[in-house]
């Protein structure tokens, strides 16, 4: 029997991460409300990502790991963009400037120009996280 870790996008744009042994039933419970206080106050919810695991403990470990991630890192996972997942796995001060926008850059801050006044567009090297090494997410 497979077990699942999943991410729901709530009506207010926040994410809920959970795990279950019956994905369709659990999504229905969230949609109906009353199952989970967090999602009940943020209906409707939409399943945006899920991954199956061979055991409940692996699904629970993945849930706990993903729950601690930033919204930007969860969005990278949802998009399947492993270079962005790796980027957001690093502490902010260790991140190398990239071609995609962060919150500060979207607000016109955070970009640093080189001597010629041009913003560097350097892609970060791929750094696998513990999750990727295990090959589950």
Image (cartoon, rainbow, N blue to C red):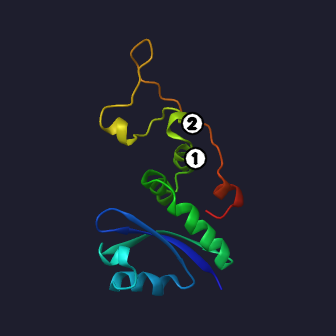
Badge 1: few (under 14), some or many (20 or more) residues near its Cα, within 10 Å? Answer: many
Badge 2: few (under 14), some or many (20 or more) residues near its Cα, within 10 Å? Answer: some
**Quarter of the picture holding the C terminus:** bottom right
Seen from this angle, which residue lies furthest top?
A: 115
Q: Position of residue 104 (x, y in %)?
A: 36, 37
State the residue in front, 38 or 97: 38
State the residue in front, 36 or 104: 36
Q: Position of residue 34 (x, y in %)?
A: 35, 85
Q: Position of residue 20 (x, y in %)?
A: 54, 80
* Position above or below: 53 against 94: below
Seen from this angle, which residue lies furthest front?
A: 37
State the residue in front, 19 or 54: 19
For image coordinates 66% across by 75% down, the residue present is 57
Asked which quadrant contains residue 51, the reply is bottom right
- Which one is earlier in the sequence, the residue at label 2 or at label 1? 1
Please give the count of numbered marks on the rendered protein.
Answer: 2
Mark 2, secondary structure of its residue:
loop
Left or right side of 17 for 32: left
Left or right side of 40 for 83: right
Asked which quadrant contains residue 65, the reply is bottom right
Q: Marks 2/1: CA distance?
A: 8 Å
Residue labelled with disc 2: 124
For image coordinates 38% across by 15% down, the residue present is 117
For image coordinates 47% across by 25% down, the residue present is 120
Pointers 2 and 1 in contact (CB under 8 A)?
yes
Residue labelled with disc 1: 86
């Amino acid at each position: 029997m497979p077990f699942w870790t999943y991410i729901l996008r709530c009506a207010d744009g926040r994410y809920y991460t959970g795990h279950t042994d019956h994905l369709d039933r659990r999504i229905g419970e969230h949609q109906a409300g009353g199952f989970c206080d967090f999602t009940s106050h943020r209906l409707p919810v939409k399943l945006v990502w899920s991954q199956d695991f061979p055991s409940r403990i692996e699904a629970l470990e993945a849930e706990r790991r993903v729950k601690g991630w930033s919204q930007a890192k969860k969005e990278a996972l949802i998009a399947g963009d492993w270079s962005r997942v790796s980027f957001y796995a690093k502490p902010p001060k260790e991140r190398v400037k990239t071609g995609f926008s962060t919150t500060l850059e979207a607000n016109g801050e955070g970009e640093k120009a080189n001597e010629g006044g041009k913003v560097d567009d350097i892609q970060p090297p791929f750094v696998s996280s513990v999750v990727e090494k295990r090959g589950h997410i």
